[in-house]
Amino acid sequence: MVYNKNMNNGKYKEIIENYSKLLCEQDKIDNELYLKYEVKRGLRDISGKGVLVGLTEISEIISYIIEDGDLVPCEGKLYYRGINIENIVRGFLDENRFGFEEVCFLLLFGHLPNKTESEDFISLLKDSMPLPDNFVRDTIMNAASKDMMNSLAKSVLTLYAYDDNPDDISIENVLRQSVNLIAQFPLLAVYGYQAYAHYHDNKSLVIHPPQNGLSIAENILFMLRSDSSYTKFEAQILDLALVLHAEHGGGNNSTFTNHVVTSSHTDTYSAVVASLGSLKGPRHGGANIKVVEMFRDIKEKVLNWNDDDEINAYLEKLLAKEGFDRSGLIYGMGHAVYSLSDPRALIFRQFVERLALEKGRNDEYKLYSKVETLAPKIIGKVRRIYKGVSANVDFYSGFVYSMLDLPEELFTPLFAVARVAGWSAHRLEELVNNGKIIRPAYKSVTKQQSYIPMKDRG
């Protein structure tokens, strides 16, 4: 390939290295200018509060209350279409049902389905699940990607070519496309991984078609595992993970990306791929992998998992950029919005201990619990915190996925399998309200200069 050939060319490498250094120096903007022009970096103010850029009826996050005009941190709350996520989870678990399909309906249509609506919607998802003829062979298996998020993106963009009406952005057509994508994402993710495992890890290739009568969570485990076996509790906790990841307000990076791209009136497939590109980042959907990698390092470096002092010393090294990846972060701790608690993490934690006991990994669970307790205290001592710090949902989700024997390559794609429901709801909301194209302002801080003819340049 020309690209690889160029990369091995000494002169080419030298040019790239030199210009890279130049760009780092030339494009670096003085931090003082951000303060001078009151730029809200990351669309957040200094206290961490997000800049209001839109309105939504799909979900709400509460992390503080207002008392005497001041923002006071409170226990985090998450609402889907005005219903507390804790009550949603309790509702389907008390009735011994799977909840993800119900949540997809709620996010798309704004109300909980009755029995008939639920049965019809599940039937619709089942009918929408099969991929086009030869799609697995021609698209997923062809040039299998080493990155599952890129594999998902390739598959979604290719589905555009199989759609008889891909560019129609009427609500009816976008709703049809959204239901199809929600139903097909599990297949795209699982088959993408199996293609990767076969071509890059030399593993046997086993493709299981989804089964009628199974929930989306059950079908993921059925398709993924070579013997298609799973326990009811394994499927329930995976279903719970999908429910907790399905939606998180319009301000999270991938959903905001979807709003931005949708506002240009592009097609559904392009909008979803833009969100996938955002979710791939380790600051967003890839965070749970970093938590798992960090704990792998903790288990090697901390000899006594019950020694608080030894754990504290390790965490202090992390913050000092002397440990693990030297990023200065304790992964899984803190959130852009939540302060005292992330309700998704609290819900998840109730089931993690039981799963750890069943899988013989209770010692690891106790280590996670200790880090969850100790890390906020260490962070509070070392750094100036404007709001509380607590474990977020990524803190436990990677541990849960590892106990379910899910490959790490699928951690972020499974996030996408869940979040495509929220993206779809927000895309529809953006189109229904027919807002302006989203275009925030950027101020140039470069001095104007004269054009210099080539013969006069040094």
Image (cartoon, grey):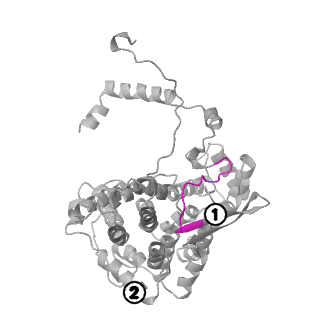
Query: Which quadrant is the N terminus positioned in?
Result: top left
Q: Residue furthest toward the right?
A: 68
Residue 305, image x, y percentages:
65, 61
Tell me the SS state at disc 1. helix
Chain part drawn in magenta: 45-60
Q: Residue at x 52, y 68 (%)?
A: 58
In terms of depth relative to the viewer, which is nearer, 84 or 196?
A: 84
Residue 119, numbered label:
2
Question: Looking at the image, which residue is at 45% across and 75% down?
Answer: 109
Question: Residue 225, percent across and down?
Answer: 36, 72
Q: Which residue is mark 1?
A: 367
Predominant secondary structure in magenta? Answer: loop
Q: Earlier in the sequence, mark 1 or mark 2?
A: 2
- Nearest the viewer among 363 and 259 is 259
Q: Quadrant of residue 263?
A: bottom left
Q: Residue 212 versus residue 261: which sits nearer the camera?
A: 261
Give residue 183's position: percent from left, percent from top. 35, 72
> Please, what is the three-letter code of the amino acid marked with disc 2?
Glu
Q: How many labels, in total?
A: 2
Q: Residue 112: which numbered mark, if any?
A: none
Vertical position of residue 214 compared to residue 155: above or below: below
Q: CA distance from mark 1 to mark 2?
A: 42 Å
Q: Secondary structure at mark 2?
A: helix
